[in-house]
Image (cartoon, grey):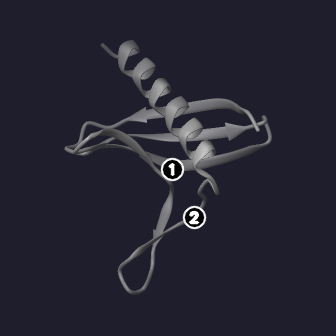
Amino acid sequence: MEITEIRVTLRDEERLKGFANVTFDNAFVVRGMKIIQGNNGYFVAMPSRKRSNGTHQDVAHPVNSDMRCMIEEKVLEAYENELKTHS
């Protein structure tokens, strides 16, 4: 599976730094990934919905760590590129 497009929308909040929409194989898109500044650097949070008990559940997510790493690497790279174009 290949990531064929990533669109980043920047935010300037304390921890939320942006949103990403990621297209796979020019055929499937996942919208609403969050770019978060954590205590140990940036990470990508998958889109989620709030449950009635107040917890959150991912709407879409990778099923293995290799895919998670690949998505995070590509999204953070796109985020850095977007920051450069707005500097």
Q: Position of residue 30 (x, y in %)?
A: 62, 49
Which quadrant holds the N terminus?
top right
Q: Is residue 62 above or below residue 21?
A: below
Give the amino acid at mark 1: Gly
Q: Nearer the viewer, mark 1 or mark 2?
A: 2
Look at mark 1 in the image and give the residue it sits on.
Answer: 32
Q: Position of residue 17 (x, y in %)?
A: 32, 38
The quadrant where residue 71 appears: top right
Q: Position of residue 58 (x, y in %)?
A: 52, 65
Q: In the image, 78: left or right of 24?
A: left
C-beta proximity under 8 Å, tags 1 and 2: yes
Look at mark 2 in the image and give the residue it sits on.
Answer: 59
Q: Residue at x 49, y 48 (%)?
A: 33
**Total number of numbered discs in the rendering:** 2
Indicate the secondary structure of the residue bearing disc 1: strand
The quadrant where residue 4 appears: top right
Q: Residue furthest bottom?
A: 53
